Amino acid sequence: MTLEITYNDDTVNAVLSGRLDTANSQLFAVEMQPLMDKADKHIVLDCTDLEFVSSSGLRLLLSLRKQTIAMGGDVTIKNVHPEVMQVFTITGFFSLFKFE
Amino acid sequence: MNKILGIRNLINITLAVMLIGGIVFASGFGISLYWAQQEVTTEADMKIAANIDCIHTYVDGQLQRVEDAAYTLLCTEFGNTVRNNDSTARVMIDYRNFKKPSPQEIFHLLSKFLDSNPQVCGIAVGLEKEVYSTPDQPNGFAAYVTNVGGRKENLSLGAMHDFREKMWYNNAIKSRKPVWSNPFRETSHGRVVTCFSVPLYGDHDNILGVLAVDINTETFRNKCNAISPFPNSTVTLTDRDFRFVAHPDTTLLLQHVEQAGEYYNCNDFADSVKSKMEAHQSGHHTMRNASGDDVLFYFTSIERSGWTIAIECPKASVFGSIDRMRRDTIIIAVVSILIMVVCFVWLFRRIQGVALSKAGMERELKIAAGIQRGMLPDDASSLHRDELDVCGYICPAKSVGGDLYDYFVVDDKLYFGIGDVSGKGVPASLFMAVVHTLFRNLSAHDSDPAHIMSAMNEALCRGNEHNMFCTMFMGVLDLSTGKLNYCNAGHCAPVLRRGSEVEALSVKTNIALGVIEGFPYQGQETYLAGDDGVFLFTDGVSEAEDRDKTLYGDNRVLSALSAAFAQTDHKAKTTIDMMIDSLNDHVGDAEQSDDITMLMISYNGGRVHTLKLVNNINEVSQLATWVDKVIKDFNLPQDKAFNLNLAIEEAVVNVMNYAYDEPGQPITVEATMKCDELLVTITDNGKEFDPTNAADPDLDLPAEERPIGGLGVMLVRHIASEVKYERVNESNKLSLYFK
């Protein structure tokens, strides 16, 4: 799992790749701390290379979403694989994020 | 084979033939020999009797002629015949009127008598002095003329001695009737003679003279010697005292028979013959002489002189012809038996040749049966598969049969089949070999039973001039999943074992292979779980007959299988053995009419993949690799990988989060196929926790109100087709089923 973050004026672009499984979620929690800090911005998560996501990953994404709600930011997820999207759908997370 | 036509038997049979031939010959020979012996005996009797008669007639004739001549001489020259009261005759001399010829006239008279009776060798006449006397013979006159080799000698006996003392005179005086003396040897000429003395009676019953006539017994000897009814037979003549008058051995003349020895001394002779001879009877007797030779002894008496004619014939010469016949017959018999034996051996060899060619054929059939048996797999151990236990049984009705079964594993799939070719024997076995080869070859390229069957059908229909066909059932069992694809071609439906229960397998009949070209064979499928099985058989099982032609029948097949499956031992061989026993109980000693073939396949369940983890989140990363392996191994579609990964990970993480308080505790994940579903079980020894009880989170809540937990279980429930929780032996067991 890798997370590459680039900062623009109003948006933060993050490219999430690899497997976001339970084992990786602790690492992800550390790596996404910059995003949590910039939760007032519009965060765009590029999931083109995201292969897998588990509930642990979802929980972290949920906490990011909650942070943006608290700080006035927003989260957009784009280029999600159908299989990963299915997880968002099942869990009802589909309604919590903007998808492109 | 060798046992039937071996050299030992050849010898035995030859001996038997010789024995039987020998017995037949011997009995035929014995009977004919018996009759021949009877015939020869009768003939010998007649022949010897005729010979004895001949001698008797001759001797008696000679004696009689001499007697007659003597009487004639007496009557004409000395007296006349007077008949006695007892009808015997006596010669009377009228001595008072006796004309008294001169001695010269008397000698002349006697000499003339000798001339006219050549058999007579000497003649004597003695007259008392009352009748006749001369100066030189004053006490009575006796004249004797003898013929010695044609020369006559005259003797005036009265001048030489008292003739009354002499035997020739005395005999007649003593017996007072004409009498033949016992033969004696003349002192003068050494001739053995017998003397006939006739008394001359006076008026008062007094004897006044004797006429005596000598016969040389040589004439009888010559006669006897001339007679020989059989080779080496001996003709003898004995006098009243049983002294030899005639015997081939002249040294024995006048010797008593008992001195002569031989059989005359043996008990047989003394007991049976001697008394008869002494009583002047006739007869014959068989006895053994001192040399141990059996002889036939014939005898008869000459009343006139009291002599006995005896003919002794060695049995060997009497039955010589029989012996020759016997010898010839034995030779012929032996030669015939030998010829018979030779013919027999020749015939035997020919039959043996035929039998050997038959034996050769049988041997080839045996080899063929071996090859055929060799085509079929021996036992399941060669498969080296833990998932499987297979046992086949085949028992052809003839040395080679038309039944077949086969099984082999390719790419984790068990291919198996059972078939029954129409007919029996060599044609069926050849067709069976073709079917078997096709099955093997086609199965190498295709795992769909319907395709394989169709392809086999096409191949078998081509050039099937003899309209052979083969019913067959085949299946392909995926060993990892238990999925069974099968196709039936007119064969009797196999029976399923579900644990310990019998279950019918739904089967589309289709049609036997080789009947309709292009027939669309339809396949079917089912799943075998662990401890399930399939029992396949041919109609040789269901149609096995007992002595009363009662069929074993499908019901017995099912009940016997029920009994077999009810056993705790579910080994395929156990099932087959029980079926064989049940079948044998039914059939008993009835002859097997059809090939009997059975195949039992026991499935021990699919492969189990196991992953052992401890309750540390970092361990979860192993799951992805393991799931990939399971997917590959069970041939699951790749697009299920994501969901499987997700669900299993969520479930495992859930256990890690809640089961244990302590770190480093074990969690076991296992994957196996249950029918067409993947079953994943997650087992831990932690505290009781049933994730299936947890309620799904409310998905309609806005993000800021969403709870952080509960998502994992929800994902699991959503992805898996079924989730089951069990608390077993202080363990939590979570079972996830995936379609």
Image (tube, coloured by chain):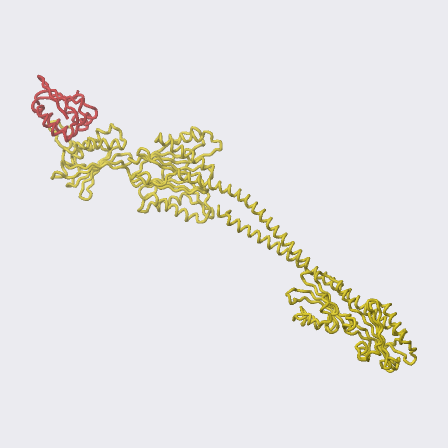
Q: Report the number of discs.
A: 0
Q: Colour of chain A?
A: red
Viewer-side residue, B415 vs B440: B440
B419, above or below B196, in the image: above
Give residue B401's position: percent from left, percent from top: 44, 40
Occupied quadrant, residue B248? bottom right
**B710 horizontally vs B100: left or right:** left
Residue B205 appears in the picture as rendered: no
What color does chain B have in the rendering?
Answer: yellow
Quadrant in which residue B530 is drawn: top left
Q: In this image, B673 relative to B535: left or right?
A: left
- Residue at the spot x=9%, y=27% of the render? A30
Left/right of residue B709 with respect to residue B208 in the rendered view: left
Question: Where is residue B132 drawn, in percent x and y?
Answer: 89, 80
Measuring from the top left, give residue A24's x and y in whole percent. 14, 29
Quarter occupied by residue B570: top left
- Residue under the image location 89 percent in, 78 percent down: B93
Q: Residue at left 17%, top 24%?
A: A50
Toward the viewer: B219 or B240? B219
Location of residue B293 in the rendering, given as x and y in whole percent from the top left corner: 65, 64
Judge whether B225 appears above or below B211 on screen. Answer: above
Q: Is residue B399 left or right of residue B447?
A: right
Q: Quadrant of the C terminus of chain B?
A: top left
Taking depth in this image into account, of B166 and B575 the one nearest to the observer is B166
Vertical placement of residue B434 versus B271, above or below: above
Residue B382 in sight: yes
The outermost residue toward the top is: A9
